[in-house]
Amino acid sequence: MKRLLLIFLGSIHFCLAQEVEFDIFFDLGKYTLSSKHEKKIDAQLANLDTTTTYNFVIKGYTDFVDTETFNLKLSQDRADAVTTYLQKQYESIINSIEKEAKGELPNETSQKNEQIGIQQHRKVSITISKNDHKPKITERKENIYVVPTNELKVGSSYSLGKINFKTGRVTLIKSSKKELEKLVRFLRKNRNIHIEVQGHVCCGGDDDSDALNSDTGTYTLSVDRARFIYNYLINRGIDKDRLSYKGYAFKTPLHFPEKGNRDRSANRRVEIKITKN
């Protein structure tokens, strides 16, 4: 009996890990997100695995108050508001977002109060499902050195010059040291900027997992390379409180499927996310 219970509980955990569904509710005629809305979204997403990506389905609804045309637009605005928040706060775990304006939900009672409406119908429904390890194609980022520093956006990622490592290892090719020194100078000059060093690898298939570090025998190459640069910056005098690092494996390639050495080289990259400016 105990064994059956464990299997049952494990099945529940698996289902919860694979899909999350919840609603957030709005006041009459409103669509902007409050801090209460944001806290609920954050709480629902808190247990998601940040090393993988997810597919989001966002559906906006209204009650019957006002015209159908107005309500369709309002449901779109509600869905847009949620989508914008997710893209700003959770870009790294989003594989795709499907967004739909559903307009009015049908009124199941014969009586309608045109002033009160139905609070439960004024909502956005959010469904989140795991991406089953398929990589998310991303766009090439702007170079951090060509964007005015006061326009660098917190939460956004930027490219650097080419930083190359030896194949399968955390050993820099000599020419890459110049690029790292350029980053050191940039951070020394702009002391208010905090960054996350982001490591990416190439040569993946449908599986978005990390690559093999041939020195350690572990599949943590993107993390190890990001950590190397993090430590390099600290050793060059950059305050570690301004720095963090993360490996993104093969989750967000610039090219997929890879069609040759040029695509693989482009995917095998280091980027910088602004965490404070």
Image (spheres, rainbow, N blue to C red):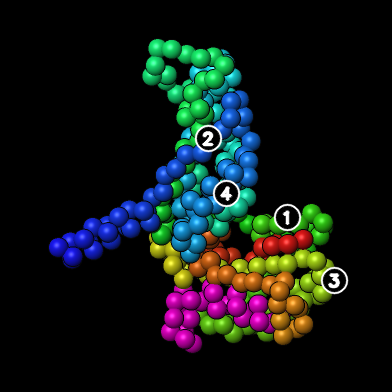
Q: How far, Cα to Cα, is label 2 from label 4?
A: 13 Å
CB atoms of marks 2 and 3 within 8 Å: no
| Mark 1 nearby-residue class (10 Å; few <14, some 14–19, many ≥20) | some
Q: Which of 108 and 216 is in front in this view?
A: 108
Q: How far, Cα to Cα, is label 1 from label 4?
A: 22 Å
What residue would you read off at disc 3?
189
Q: In the picture provided, is 9 more to the left or to the right than 266?
A: left
Looking at the rendered structure, the kind of residue marked 2 is Phe
- In the image, is residue 277 above or below residue 114? below
Which of disc 3 and disc 1 is earlier in sequence? Answer: 1
- Mark 1 vs mark 4, foreground winner is 4
What residue would you read off at disc 4?
39
**Residue pictured at 63% horizontal, 41% vertical:** 34
| Place of residue 213 in the rendered image (x, y in percent of width and height, measured from the top left) | 48, 81
Which of disc 4 and disc 2 is earlier in sequence? Answer: 2
Q: How far, Cα to Cα, is label 2 from label 3?
A: 46 Å
- Mark 2 vs mark 3, foreground winner is 2
Which of disc 3 and disc 2 is earlier in sequence? Answer: 2
Which region shows up in magenta?
A: 211-233
- Mark 3 vs mark 4, foreground winner is 4
Residue 205 lies in what quarter of the image?
Answer: bottom left
**Residue pictured at 53% horizontal, 66% vertical:** 248
Give the quadrant of the C terminus. bottom right
CB atoms of marks 1 and 4 within 8 Å: no
- In the image, is residue 193 above or below residue 131? below
Looking at the rendered structure, the kind of residue marked 1 is Lys
Which of disc 1 and disc 2 is earlier in sequence? Answer: 2
Q: In the picture provided, is 134 more to the left or to the right than 142?
A: left
Looking at the rendered structure, the kind of residue marked 4 is Lys
| Place of residue 195 in the rendered image (x, y in percent of width and height, measured from the top left) | 70, 67
Could you say which disc has been placed on residue 153 in the image? Answer: 1
What residue would you read off at disc 2?
25
